[in-house]
Amino acid sequence: MDIGSAVGRELGVTEEQLRDLPRYRESEAFSEEERLAISLAEEMVKTPVEIPPELSEKLRQHFDEAQLVELAATIARENHRARFNRVFGVRPVGFSKGDFCVLPERPKEEISR
């Protein structure tokens, strides 16, 4: 998340978007296309991966086939990187030092421990 926040900033992701990411569905900081891409990412990291037909339909209304292939490939690559890093305990190293850094929200049962 550290490097992802830093790279995102370089590519135009705003501080408001970083802060609102956990609430992207309700946030006005995201366009409809951005919300759909984030929804696809959420579905793709689940096991098993099952994209709801209504999400597929909405994605196809906003993206052509080449865009969907690129989007899905990017999400898959980032998911692979994130899981690989977890195996080796890769921690933030200061790419977002002094800036807001998105942290994954932990499930409630994990917080109460």
Image (cartoon, rainbow, N blue to C red):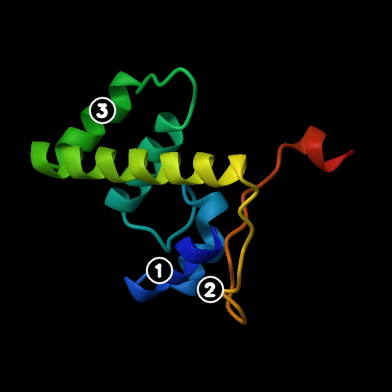
| The one of 49 and 38 positioned closer to us in this rendering | 49
* Mark in front: 2 vs 3: 2
Label 1 and label 2: CA atoms lie apart by 9 Å
Residue ID at (55%, 74%): 96
The local crowd at label 3, few if under 14, some if 14 to 19, many if 20 or more residues have their Cα within 10 Å, is few
Residue furthest to the right? 113
Q: Earlier in the sequence, mark 3 or mark 1?
A: 1
Q: Which quarter of the picture shows residue 40?
A: top left
Q: In the displayed structure, would residue 50 be above or below residue 21?
A: above
Say if mark 1 contacts mark 2, CB within 8 Å: yes
Q: Mark 1 points at which residue?
A: 7
Q: Name the residue under label 2.
A: 95
Amino acid marked by disc 3: Ser
Image location (x, y in percent) of residue 22: 56, 51
Q: In the displayed structure, would residue 109 be above or below residue 24?
A: above
Q: Name the residue under label 3.
A: 56
